[in-house]
Amino acid sequence: MQLKGKTVLITGGASGIGLEAAKQFLANGAQVIITGRNQGKLDEAKKVYPAITAIKSDLSDADDTKKLFGQVTQLGGIDILYNNAGVLTDPINLGLADDRHFEDAAYEINVNYLAVIRLNNLFMDMLKSRKESAIINTTSILSFVPSLLEATYAAAKAALHFYTVSLREHLQALSSSVKVFELIPPLVATEMAANMEGKRITTETLVKAFINGLQKDQLNIRVGDTKLAAVLNRLAPKLIFGLVNPERSYKVIASQNTL
């Protein structure tokens, strides 16, 4: 896929993977619009990269998302929609009777899954009208290996993975020019993953592989450990489950039970 001259909208673009993606898209000649809930972070991103356009928006709010669509339309529209935004609640012990389970699950499913569908639906006709366009959904290594401590996050990413595959096939059946990419990262050194255990890769390393995959029309972009994890999940599911859920996970669960 050609990136030069394209306009990309990056959700969750003010920090972490999204901000690094903004940097590298700019370096490849694209115009970049970022959106996020935190105006302070958006302002800081704009200071670092003055060429970007920053729009405050809460993707969990349907009305706010419609406003975002209107603002982007006024700017001339986009060629690439990169659904990068995601949320992760604190570790949850599902074995305990607690209303928090449902509240956190609803929040994560809304932002990590339903908001993606809402945004895709809003921008679909715009993207279909372009000669070459794309939707990019960020899932996770947890989309095919469940996590004991991030159960609803993993469930949302699994749902997003299957939705992404289905959306791609639907658009191909319609002979649409919209390409559907899935970025499947391992554990990345971001603020969200600060309390997770395991080897991390940098956002720069991840996004370099991501951009390379886009340019090669690699629809499923697995980076780092996700390449091996996908194989192990088929051949040795118990092994990969244990690697994703080390002894520490069980200790956290046990400690919550004593609170």
Image (cartoon, rainbow, N blue to C red):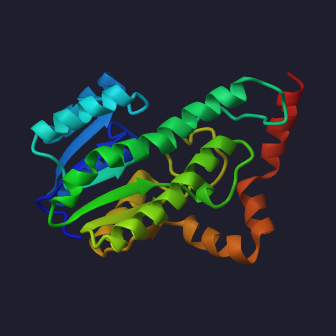
Q: Nearer the viewer, residue 72 or 32?
A: 72
Determine which quarter of the picture holds residue 158. bottom right
Q: Residue at x 50, y 47 (%)?
A: 189
Q: Where's residue 76, x and y in %?
A: 9, 44
* In the depicted structure, whether residue 49 falls above or below residue 97: below
* In the depicted structure, whether residue 117 falls above or below residue 165: above
From the viewer's perspective, is 226 left or right of 34?
right
- Which residue is situated farthest in the front direction here? 174
From the viewer's perspective, is 202 left or right of 258?
left
Q: Nearer the viewer, residue 213 or 181?
A: 181
Q: Residue at x 84, y 36 (%)?
A: 95
Q: Quadrant of the C terminus?
A: top right
The answer to whether any part of residue 61 appears in the image is yes
Q: Where's residue 212, x and y in %?
A: 32, 69
Q: Where's residue 17, x and y in %?
A: 40, 48
Report the number of numbered marks: 0
